[in-house]
Amino acid sequence: MTHTMKRVLAALCATAAAGGAMIAAPAAAEERPLILVVPYPPGGSTDILARILQPRLSQQLGGRAVVVENRPGAASQIATAFVARAEPDGNTLLVSFDNHGINPAVKPKLPYDTFKDFVAISQTVRFPLVIGANPGVPGDNLKAFLAAAAKESPNKFNYASTGVGSLNHLAPEELKRLSKVDLLHVPYGGGGPAIQAVVGGQANMTWLSFAALRGQIQAGKIKPLAVAGEKRLPELPNVPTVAESGFPGFVAYSWSGMFAPKGTPEATVKKLTADFKAVLADPEIKKKVTEAGFEIVASDGPALDAYVKSEYDRWSAFIKSSNINLDN
């Protein structure tokens, strides 16, 4: 082989190696998995919702992998801060919970700015909180329980929340103020741990979605006392609303929405909004979501931004007017 041919072959090998390197380079954004970051451990409302949507969303994206990633801790701050710092390419989304709009009112030093570090995609669902109690708690409904609790010493009974400043912390505090019955707040690190505490008897009750409580209710390990919605749940027709229990107008709806990091291209945001709307319009998904006790919202980004601001305003005013312990 001549010296010239050797040089040509060497050049061809180098070119092939370079081509291989190009093939091994990171795939385009839309070819990488879509990560749905859930701020709580498995078993809670946001986790259940994300896993209902996951396979249909993958189908909507042409078979692209969709991964549910749980990053619990610090009342959703760990997951939320992670998404805020993620590359703004539409590959990493926050599956937010109700405390996304409440945290800035109760936690002055968040590691992110709720209103500046995210782009809203869609409010996917809302759902009324269900008051689920350990079967040993007195009363078969909220009215009967409060009547029994009023005869006991203050804080004899407690309730588990998903964390300080969550909706299932503030809503029970509002009921405490209205009923004048003292209940001790015990924060846990998510819906799953709160349910385990109630089933195990470490906590007397919790306020969570029907989706999160359904299995334990069906197994007889948790009894539903009331639904904090505008009407009774079709799945719990004999369980009264909080309003029916002597507190007219009382409602407490939790919710979930999708957020991307600030700087995500507008075209990507619009496509993601359209994708989630398509998924939530699917008859099979609608059936699963409804059976889990969720109400489909499927809003666009601006509507979600407005809703987060209204929730912040509502609960900021409540916190300021009430003597709530935000340290526990």
Image: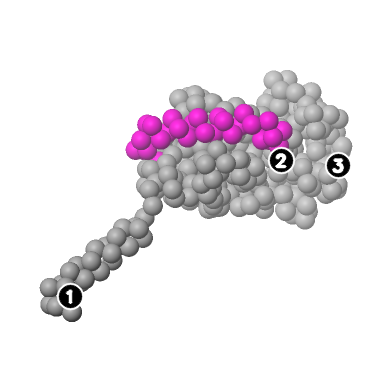
| Picture residue at 61% right of the left edge, 52% below the top | 41
Mark in front: 3 vs 2: 2
- What is the x, y in percent for residue 253? 64, 30
Find the residue positioned furthest to the top.
248
Q: In which quarter of the image is residue 5?
A: bottom left
Q: Is residue 61 above or below residue 27?
A: above
Instruction: Tell me the kind of residue under disc 2.
Output: Ala
**Mark number, residue 138:** 3
How far is the residue under mark 3 from the one under mark 1?
Answer: 89 Å
Q: Mark 1 points at which residue?
A: 6
Q: Is 140 a magenta residue?
A: no
Which numbered disc, 3 or 2, marks the residue that appears first in the sequence? Answer: 3
Q: In this view, does 194 lie above or below 209?
A: below
Q: Judging from the image, what secondary structure is the residue with disc 2 in?
A: helix
Instruction: Tell me the kind of residue under disc 3.
Output: Pro
Q: Name the residue under label 2.
A: 211
Identify which residue, 112 or 58, lies in the foreground.
Answer: 58
Assess disc 1: are there few (<14), some (14-19) or many (≥20) residues with their C-alpha within 10 Å of its C-alpha.
Answer: few
Which numbered disc, 3 or 1, marks the residue that appears first in the sequence? Answer: 1
| Picture residue at 37% right of the left edge, 38% below the top | 264
| Picture residue at 86% right of the left edge, 30% below the top | 238
Q: Judging from the image, what secondary structure is the residue with disc 1 in?
A: helix
Mark in front: 3 vs 1: 1
